[in-house]
């Protein structure tokens, strides 16, 4: 009988230990790939920086870190932007190195704050320098640009020389955390990806981040005045089932045909309107609601 009681106690203790286990959060600085690229640039002064970047950064980083990610093909395309402005790359790397401990603390604090609302046990954040092609965009985003690689990985392009990065970084982590969680819960059952899905996906990310960091200014969620929102919505509403990703990206990010950040603003509006009418629903629930359900209960 004593042995049986002891066994039960051990089993219960083991279960409680698992339940109470701390989430596995990691912050990784894959600067070695970029340093290898810089070393070759300085050594050989190559005529073709793109090929060298492909050899030293894009291919090895993708193969070592992201090949098994759910959004691997998108990561591969995202990493295609070469860092051709060498002084900018060096400055960015030096800034990250200078603030490494602070960056790690900000990220881990943000992840724990996110975990208090939605439990997600395994997330790795990779901090990389921005591509020189993104210099203009990243300035408008306070030095921080996030990209969800899959259900366990997030890539953050960070320029610590831009004012406001310390406030924007935890917001970006919360936004991408939302995507990571959604991917874990929904990716396996995904059969299509429409413009409406993209709008609501990003709207959920921003609404979740604003729950935790309401004071952070996000120009992409308020890029349009009401009249411009109405105009854009009238143009895109007939295209909500469109599955052409290049077209979707035009709506989200802007192009010659569509206003900058228009899709992000519309998506944020749709989800925030839904939440204003359904305040009692927990984030762990509404994150997984379909885009159709969210739209139907919004005022759009």
Image: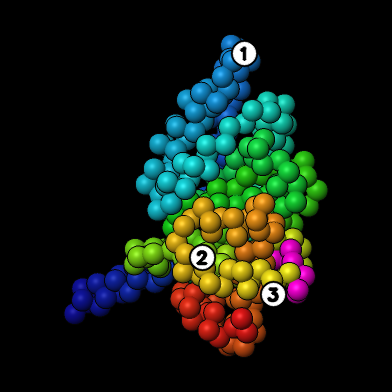
Q: Residue at x 62, y 44 (%)?
A: 157
Q: Is residue 78 left or right of residue 19?
A: right
Q: Where's residue 67, x and y in %?
A: 39, 43
Q: Nearer the viewer, mark 2 or mark 1?
A: 2
Sequence-earlier tag: 3 or 1: 1
Question: Alpha carbon of mark 3 to alpha carbon of mark 2: how far?
Answer: 17 Å
Q: How many marks?
A: 3
Rendered view: 109 above or below 277: above
Badge 1: few (under 14), some or many (20 or more) residues near its Cα, within 10 Å?
few
Badge 2: few (under 14), some or many (20 or more) residues near its Cα, within 10 Å?
many
Residue at which label 3 appears = 230
Q: Residue at x 73, y 69 (%)?
A: 228
Instruction: Provide the residue span drawn in magenta.
Output: 221-227
Rendered view: 136 above or below 40: below
Could you say which disc has been placed on residue 195 in the image?
2
Q: Residue at x 74, y 63 (%)?
A: 223
């Amino acid at each position: 009988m004593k042995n049986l009681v002891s066994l039960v106690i051990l089993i219960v203790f083991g279960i409680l230990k698992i339940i109470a286990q701390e989430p596995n959060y990691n912050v990784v600085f894959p600067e070695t790939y970029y340093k290898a690229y810089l070393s070759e640039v300085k050594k050989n002064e190559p005529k073709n920086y793109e090929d060298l970047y492909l050899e030293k950064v894009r291919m090895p980083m993708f193969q070592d870190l992201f090949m098994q990610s759910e959004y691997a093909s998108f990561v591969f395309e995202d990493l295609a932007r070469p860092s051709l402005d060498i002084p900018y790359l060096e400055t960015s790397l030096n800034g990250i190195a200078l603030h490494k401990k602070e960056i790690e603390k900000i990220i881990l604090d943000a992840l724990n704050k996110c975990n208090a609302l939605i439990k997600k046990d395994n997330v790795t954040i990779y901090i990389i320098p921005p591509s020189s092609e993104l210099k203009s965009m990243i300035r408008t985003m306070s030095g921080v640009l996030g990209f969800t690689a899959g259900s366990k990985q997030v890539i953050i392009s960070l320029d610590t020389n831009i004012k406001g990065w310390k406030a924007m970084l935890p917001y970006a982590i919360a936004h991408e955390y939302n995507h990571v969680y959604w991917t874990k819960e929904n990716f396996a059952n995904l059969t299509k990806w429409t413009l409406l899905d993209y709008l609501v996906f990003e709207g959920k990310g921003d609404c979740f981040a604003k729950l935790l960091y309401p004071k952070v200014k996000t120009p992409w969620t308020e890029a349009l005045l009401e009249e411009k929102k109405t105009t854009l919505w009238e143009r895109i509403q007939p295209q909500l089932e469109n599955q052409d990703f290049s077209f979707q990206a035009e709506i989200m990010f802007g192009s010659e045909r569509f206003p900058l950040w228009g899709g992000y603003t519309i998506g944020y509006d749709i989800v925030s309107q839904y939440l204003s009418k359904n305040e009692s629903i927990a984030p762990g629930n509404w994150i997984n609601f379909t885009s159709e359900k969210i739209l139907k209960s919004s005022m759009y």
